[in-house]
Image (cartoon, rainbow, N blue to C red):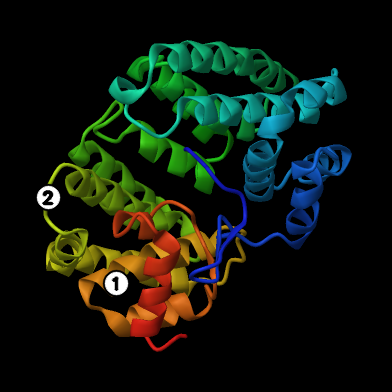
Amino acid sequence: MIRAVLDVLDKTSRMRLGRSWDDPALEHVLPQVKAGRLEPGLELISQARGDNELRALRVEQLAIAGAAHTEPLGRLAGDNVDGLLWLGAARIEQAWAIRGASYARYVDAERLVRFGEVLSSAAGPLRQVTEALPDDPVPWDRLQWHGIGMQSGRKELDRIWTELTARDPHLYLGHYSRAQALCAKWYGSDEELLTFARSATASARPGDPVTAILPLAHFEIVWSEINETEQPAQNLLEAYFGNSDVADPLIEAADKWRDGNRPHPRALDAAHLFGAAFYFGGHLTRAQRLLTGAGRRMPEILPWSAASPLPGRRYARARRDLGLS
């Protein structure tokens, strides 16, 4: 959840962190929003009504960009339902930025109090949106992050998930958020997370990158192991993804995605998740095929952060290993 950067060019690796998605209009508007010019962002969110995947992407990214501007965003939003959606999402990002990425035991009391205050203020605008736009799944996706941060409990998070999937059973970001809630560090377990990811893959339509929730689940599990051991991350990743019990279902899931022809704004994200899993597992031809199209655009957290605290450099090295640089 923690996004420390927004489209940062890693000068040592020349990789663009935080750009594993495709939306030229959003790419054009984000620098304006980051500089405090908010109206174009609101227009983009409004234009995306009816396209759940695009709307979810735009709300997520504009929330990151607008997290430093929540007061003027509140004035701009007024009673505008799309503005309220953006405001609630931006307050969630603002709260998590205050808290930081560390486990709660490493966060000082003052920051935790401020985190809770800001996060609490996100609920009202989002709930207004759920009432005004009863068919919109996007506010329910953002409420998942609110519930995780507020420690609302598994029962409430299950209720939110039911509401979300009733509106869109395949929303990529919705599944990504749910996977976080089911991690062992929050409200689930490794086995429950994998069961969820396998179910998402089985029910996915051909061509839908929601199948990439399966490699995401595996990266969450192995990343947790990496953080708890002194063994080299590379060794753990190679052993984990080299296991045929892990690799074979990933191959099936990737083929199901690639066999379809369904344009999707998060296809780059899926390419990184599958490509990195195959790279670490030794399936280099598959990794090469997937990562060729990813170019220098990459997520800023998983999958490459599992291998290194400098994910841009690690991805650049993978591209060299695969003959892509």
Q: Secondary structure at mark 1?
A: helix
Q: Look at the picture and state if 311 lies above or below 188.
A: below
Image spot of residue 284 (x, y percent):
29, 82
> Distance from label 1 to label 2 (Cα)?
24 Å
Q: Quadrant of residue 73?
A: top right
Q: Residue at x 80, y 51 (%)?
A: 29
Residue at image mark 1: 278
Q: Which residue is situated farthest in the front direction here?
A: 12
Does residue 70 appear in this view? Answer: yes
Q: In the rendered structure, which amino acid carries the disc numbered 2?
A: Glu
Image spot of residue 24 (x, y percent):
75, 62
Q: Look at the picture and state if 230 lies above or below 20.
A: above
Q: Residue at x 44, y 43 (%)?
A: 176
Please state if 87 lies on the left or on the right of 44 as rendered: left
Asked whether 154 or 236 is in front, the reply is: 236
Q: Look at the picture and state if 291 lies above or below 63.
A: below
Question: How dense is the environment of label 1, judged by Cα within 10 Å: few (below 14), some, or many (20 and up)?
Answer: many
Q: In the rendered structure, which amino acid carries the disc numbered 1?
A: Phe
Image spot of residue 217 (x, y percent):
30, 48
Q: Which disc is residue 230 wearing?
A: 2
Asked whether 62 or 137 is in front, the reply is: 62
Q: Secondary structure at mark 2?
A: loop
Q: Look at the picture and state if 129 lies above or below 4.
A: above
**What count of labels does the image hold?**
2
Q: Which disc is residue 156 wearing?
A: none
Q: Which residue is situated farthest in the bottom direction here?
A: 323
